[in-house]
């Protein structure tokens, strides 16, 4: 079985320019969308990232699942926000 990537105790999955942080089994998950990249050497590095705290309830329309949203300049600032939002949301179960 493949090992799932984790960051600060939560699973981390990437598909193309979307990163899901957290577990779909929980009430909330973070969706990070890489909106812009820039070249650093020979690598593409995220330069603008959308962060959304979302409910995981599939019975709710996708646009109504968004609890909070922000845009950050880079993946590291986006992950800083994501960790705080997800931990706070899951603590208020």
Image (tube, rainbow, N blue to C red):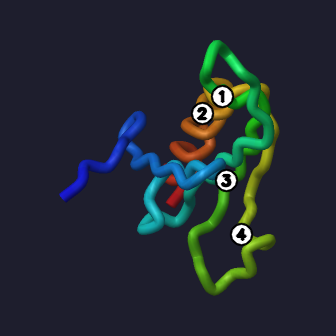
Front-lying residue, 1 or 25: 1
Is disc 4 placed on a helix, strand or loop?
Answer: helix
Q: Earlier in the sequence, mark 3 or mark 2?
A: 3
Is disc 3 in contact with disc 4, using a CB cutoff of under 8 Å? no
- Determine which quarter of the picture holds residue 49: top right
Is disc 2 placed on a helix, strand or loop?
Answer: helix
Q: Residues within 10 Å of mark 1 (few under 14, many from 20)?
A: few
Give the Cα distance between marks 4 and 2.
Answer: 20 Å
Q: In this picture, is 45 found above or below 11?
A: above
Which residue has dot 4 on it?
65
Is disc 3 placed on a helix, strand or loop?
Answer: strand
* Disc assigned to residue 79: 2
- Determine which quarter of the picture holds residue 37: top right
Q: Residues within 10 Å of mark 3 (few under 14, many from 20)?
A: many
- Determine which quarter of the picture holds residue 39: top right
Which residue has dot 3 on it?
53
Q: Position of residue 54 (x, y in %)?
A: 66, 61
Q: Residue at x 47, y 66 (%)?
A: 24
Which residue has dot 1 on it?
44
């Amino acid at each position: 079985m493949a090992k799932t990537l984790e960051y600060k105790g939560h699973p981390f999955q990437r598909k193309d320019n979307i990163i899901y942080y957290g577990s779909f089994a929980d009430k909330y998950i973070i969706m990070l969308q890489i909106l812009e990249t820039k070249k650093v050497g020979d690598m593409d590095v995220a330069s603008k990232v959308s962060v959304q705290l979302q409910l995981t309830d599939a019975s709710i329309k996708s646009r109504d699942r968004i609890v909070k949203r922000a845009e950050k300049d880079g993946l590291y600032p986006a992950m800083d926000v994501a960790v705080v939002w997800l931990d706070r949301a899951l603590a208020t179960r």
